[in-house]
Amino acid sequence: MDASTTTTVLSAVVTSDMVSGVLNEVVALLPVILPAAIGFIAIRKGVSFVLGMLRSA
């Protein structure tokens, strides 16, 4: 199977509606994932800061 056959088969299976549906779901998840990721990074930095202060004390 060469690349042109794979592209033809893939384009017959994947439609623009499927791709736009996936994009809509990813965009819908951003308001949930973004604050969670920022919170995780903040907690990590906070713990690192506290441990650094305790080590230096």
Image (cartoon, rainbow, N blue to C red):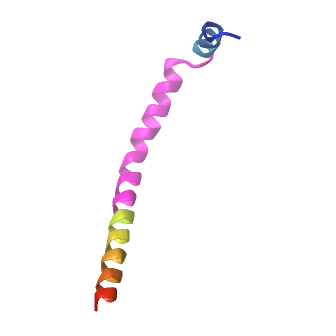
Give the answer, above or below, for where 30 lies relative to 16: below
Give the answer, above or below, for where 47 lies relative to 32: below
Identify the magenta region: 13-38
- Residue, x 61% and y 16% (percent of image)? 10
The residue furthest right is 1
- Residue 42, magenta (yes or no): no
- Place of residue 18 in the rendered image (x, y in percent of width and height, measured from the top left): 53, 25
- Place of residue 57 in the rendered image (x, y in percent of width and height, measured from the top left): 28, 92
Give the answer, above or below, for where 32 lies relative to 57: above
- Residue, x 66% and y 9% (percent of image)? 2
The one of 34 and 42 positioned closer to us in this rendering: 42
- Place of residue 22 in the rendered image (x, y in percent of width and height, measured from the top left): 49, 33
Give the answer, above or below, for where 44 lies relative to 23: below
**Does residue 25 appear to the left or right of 3 in the view shown?**
left
- Residue, x 36% and y 53% (percent of image)? 34
- Residue, x 36% and y 71% (percent of image)? 43
The residue furthest front is 56
The image quadrant where one finds the N terminus is top right
Quarter occupied by residue 23? top left
